[in-house]
Image (cartoon, grey):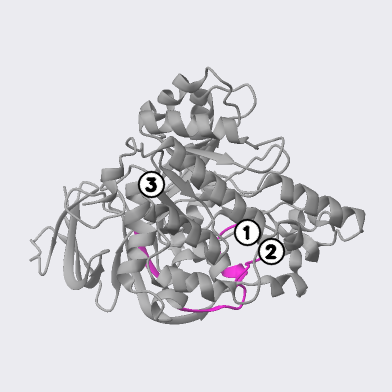
């Protein structure tokens, strides 16, 4: 088997940044050292001037999403080609348990859809039916390598989970090595605010954020953390859009609750002035973009290490889908973002002086790998890990333009943003899947990566 050596790059882990070489063969990293001498049959990749990063893990994506009401226009081929172009070598998506399905059927159906993937993927299971007596079935998910269970405290009646059911799920999850992943918004508050807007005729796109106020998110997070503490269960709060949301999680951690949280580029880089702009429909998502000043408060918490993961919550709805109706109540919620995750976080986080390179790798590689049971196979540059590697060129400066990106939306929420650097090469399990602006991956080469049962001790070395 031919060995490949990436030479003379700047290698980044969550602990340090150093000049080193990385060797891999048979899809696996075989050595990381200050200097590795090539043999006569070795292939050498010159990484001079480049950052050598673990493949990025986007821990929250919605590829080929079917909500039962809306469906994104993409499929797993399009979604994972987009990932490859953005240096994302593992996406963690969702297998929805549709009405009447067993958990096993939900996973099998999703893996069927993902059979065309070009990078690897793991899954959370989106639980929509969990009546009393069904608790033992959760063990099936853990056995299938899907130890994280997504629930919603809103979206009645489709996805909504009441508190009693959530408490029961948390207790059972803790018993079997599961991690409950929560979209937290108070459904009653959202419903009443939406109804008041509709009654007063304020249904244009620009009123969207008013229907889902920050207090709805913050109250639900507070309640979920209380239930998790009562159940002695680990919990992960997705897409925190306000600083107070993150602070609630940190306060719970201070009390001994096993809790983690994520935020996303849209909440760090955009504020609610987008709803007064020319294209408010582009920014309809749940939770919505927050007020002026909120991104800086969130960045401060990210800088202090209070945020565990940065992911995208990416949904590839097209302009046509966004503009089919002129009311926020009928417009699908979600933004595209997988391909721009790394350049945005490098530019406005690292180059902007808010975080270190090591922080970026911690939040976008190592921590998500540990949380969702795929470490150290994914998320690390070390002997025995998959050869998932990104070569990032920090010397390039460019402007984000939707026509340069690989998804279907037809717009970017970050249109016109200047970014520092670009993905030079993406390597997935030892195979170059993107290089020099060209996606080279073969359809269907991506693999399902089963997650191990969650253990709080796995979050520490």
Mark 2 element type? helix
Mark 1 or 3, nearer chain start:
3
Q: Which residues are magenta?
A: 401-427
Q: Is residue 39 visible?
A: yes
Mark 1 or 2, nearer chain start:
2
Quadrant of residue 130 within the rendered picture: top right
User: Which mark, by number, is residue 283?
Assistant: 2
Residue positioned 42% across, 23% down in the render:
140
Mark 3 or 2, nearer chain start:
3
Q: Nearer the viewer, residue 431 or 317?
A: 317
Q: Nearer the viewer, residue 317 or 157?
A: 157
Distance in Å between CA atoms under marks 1 and 3:
29 Å
Mark 1 element type? loop
Q: Residues within 10 Å of mark 2 (few under 14, many from 20)?
A: many
User: Which mark, by number, is residue 335?
Assistant: 1
Residue positioned 44% across, 28% down in the render:
172
> Residue 368 location in percent, x, y?
38, 52
In the drawing, does residue 215 fall left or right of residue 459? right
User: Which mark, by number, is residue 258?
Assistant: 3
> Residue 392 location in percent, x, y?
35, 70
Quadrant of residue 396 within the rendered picture: bottom left
Does residue 297 show up magenta in the picture?
A: no
Q: Residues within 10 Å of mark 3 (few under 14, many from 20)?
A: some
Whether tag 1 and tag 2 are in contact, CB under 8 A, the answer is yes
User: Which mark, by number, is residue 14?
Assistant: none
Does residue 425 show up magenta in the picture?
A: yes
Mark 3 element type? loop
């Amino acid at each position: 088997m031919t060995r490949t050596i990436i030479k003379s790059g700047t290698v980044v882990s969550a602990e340090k940044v150093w000049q080193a070489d990385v060797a891999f063969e048979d899809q696996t990293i075989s050595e990381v050292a200050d200097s590795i001498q090539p043999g006569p049959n070795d292939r050498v990749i010159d990484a001079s001037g480049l950052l050598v990063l673990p493949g990025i893990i986007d821990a929250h994506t919605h590829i080929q999403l079917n909500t039962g009401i809306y469906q994104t226009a993409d499929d797993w081929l399009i979604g994972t080609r987009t990932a490859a172009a953005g240096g994302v070598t593992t996406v963690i998506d969702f297998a929805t348990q549709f009405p009447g399905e067993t958990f096993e059927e939900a996973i099998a159906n999703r893996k069927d859809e993902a059979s065309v993937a070009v990078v690897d993927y793991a899954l959370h299971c989106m639980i929509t039916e969990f009546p009393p007596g069904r608790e033992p079935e959760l063990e099936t998910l853990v056995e299938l390598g899907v130890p994280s269970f997504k629930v919603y405290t809103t979206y009645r009646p489709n996805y909504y989970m009441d508190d009693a059911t959530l408490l029961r799920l948390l207790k059972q999850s803790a018993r079997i090595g599961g991690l409950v992943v929560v979209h937290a918004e108070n459904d009653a508050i959202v419903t009443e605010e939406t109804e008041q807007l509709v009654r007063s005729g304020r249904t244009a796109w620009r009123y969207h954020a008013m229907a889902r106020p920050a207090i709805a998110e913050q109250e639900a997070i507070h309640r979920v953390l209380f239930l998790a503490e009562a159940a002695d269960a680990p919990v992960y709060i997705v897409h925190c859009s306000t600083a107070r949301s993150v602070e609630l999680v940190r306060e719970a951690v201070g009390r001994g609750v096993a809790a983690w949280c994520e935020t996303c580029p849209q909440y760090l880089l955009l504020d609610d002035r987008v709803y007064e702009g020319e294209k408010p429909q582009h920014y309809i998502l749940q939770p919505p973009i927050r007020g002026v000043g909120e991104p800086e408060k969130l960045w401060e918490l990210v800088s202090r290490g209070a945020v565990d993961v940065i992911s995208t919550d990416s949904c590839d709805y097209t302009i046509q889908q966004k503009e089919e109706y002129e009311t926020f109540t009928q417009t699908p919620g979600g933004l595209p973002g997988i391909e721009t995750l790394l350049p945005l976080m490098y530019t406005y986080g690292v180059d902007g002086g808010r975080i270190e390179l090591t922080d970026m790798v911690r939040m976008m590689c190592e921590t998500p790998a540990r949380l969702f049971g795929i470490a150290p196979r994914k998320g690390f540059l070390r002997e025995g890990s998959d050869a998932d590697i990104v070569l990032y060129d920090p010397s390039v400066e460019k402007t984000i333009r939707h026509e340069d990106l690989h998804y279907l939306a037809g717009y970017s929420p970050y249109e016109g943003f200047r970014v520092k650097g670009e993905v030079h090469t993406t390597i997935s399990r030892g195979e170059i899947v993107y290089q020099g602006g060209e996606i080279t991956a073969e359809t269907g080469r991506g693999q399902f990566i089963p997650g191990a049962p969650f253990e709080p001790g796995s979050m520490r070395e």
